[in-house]
Image (cartoon, rainbow, N blue to C red):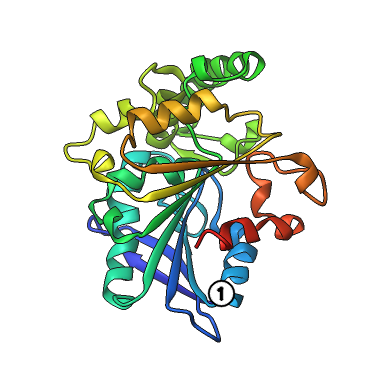
Amino acid sequence: MQQLFLKTSDHNLISVTVFEPQNPNGKLLLINSATGVKQQIYFSFAKYFAENGFTAITYDYRGIGDSKPKKMNGFHATMRIWGTDDFKTVTDFIKKNYQNHQKFCLGHSVGALIIGMNEDAHIFDKFIFVATQDAYIGNLKANIAASAVLGFGIAVPLTTKFFGYFPAHRFGLGESLPKGVAYDWRTLILNRKSTSRLYEKIATHFSKDLKQETFIIHAEDDPWVTMKGMENLMNNVYPHLKKTYREITVSDSEKGEIGHINFFRSFNKSLWKIVLNEL
């Protein structure tokens, strides 16, 4: 395991961790994190793939984990910058150092949404999407939608105005987030166009050019993800990806728990072969 810091085009430092295999198979897996989730959450998963011959790479977007600035108040970052700059910085590193590897990308939640923001997305032979969708309230279950309206309609603007960033940890939503990231998340929830609205704010994007096979995993007990939301994302943002859905049931988990994050917990290691078999 090797930790690196890569400099983005606007001179931010991004923390990257590379897991090299003892017996390489010539394959590489890049993991794009969920919103507010530190890369350490994926370390056991990445080690598992390294043990199976893959070079596995995790990283923290700017404002998150080891890529967090000393002062969050006023720090500029958006989900769009995560896609156009941070993700791009990592794929530049991959292109330079792993030219001959067969490349795959796993996007968890927002990590899948940003893939089409990077012109280098074409270097990947296949995508794995985990727990992702158009998160507009109209696609959510009623109880989750009600909570989302309160949280993103009221709590996000009030707390970000007071703190200068969104203290997401106070609401059980992971790491504290830069203001711009929180407002992009708010757009995903409250704007009917959801992910497409973020793409409209980017000068150039590549989502509709992508045609790779894409394996989409969703958990039976994930309260945030619905088939309607997944289909809206695929139809509106990634219409040419060749999609296959796989629902993981609670009974598939030894602990009976998957949700939005826990697919990547070590207690669900028995589920990771589902991804391995696809690559």
Callout 1: few (<14), some (14-19), or many (20+) C-alpha neighbours within 10 Å? many
Q: Where is residue 204 in the image (x, y as percent from the top left)?
A: 17, 40
- In the rendered image, the residue lying farthest to the left is 203
Judging depth in this view, the residue of 279 and 91 nearest the camera is 279
| Residue occupying image coordinates x 57% and y 69% | 49
Residue 107 coordinates in the image, percent (x, y): 47, 49
Task: Please state which amino acid type lies under the numbered disc 1.
Answer: Ala
State the residue at coordinates (40%, 50%).
213
Q: Residue at x 35, y 20 (%)?
A: 193
Residue 187, by quadrant, is top left
Q: In this view, does 109 lie above or below 156?
A: below
Foreground residue, 237 or 110?
A: 237
Residue 16 falls in which quadrant of the image? bottom left
Whether residue 155 can be seen here: yes
**Residue pointed to by mark 1:** 50
Residue 69: in sight, yes or no? no
Q: Nearer the viewer, residue 100 or 38?
A: 100
Q: How many labels does the image show?
A: 1
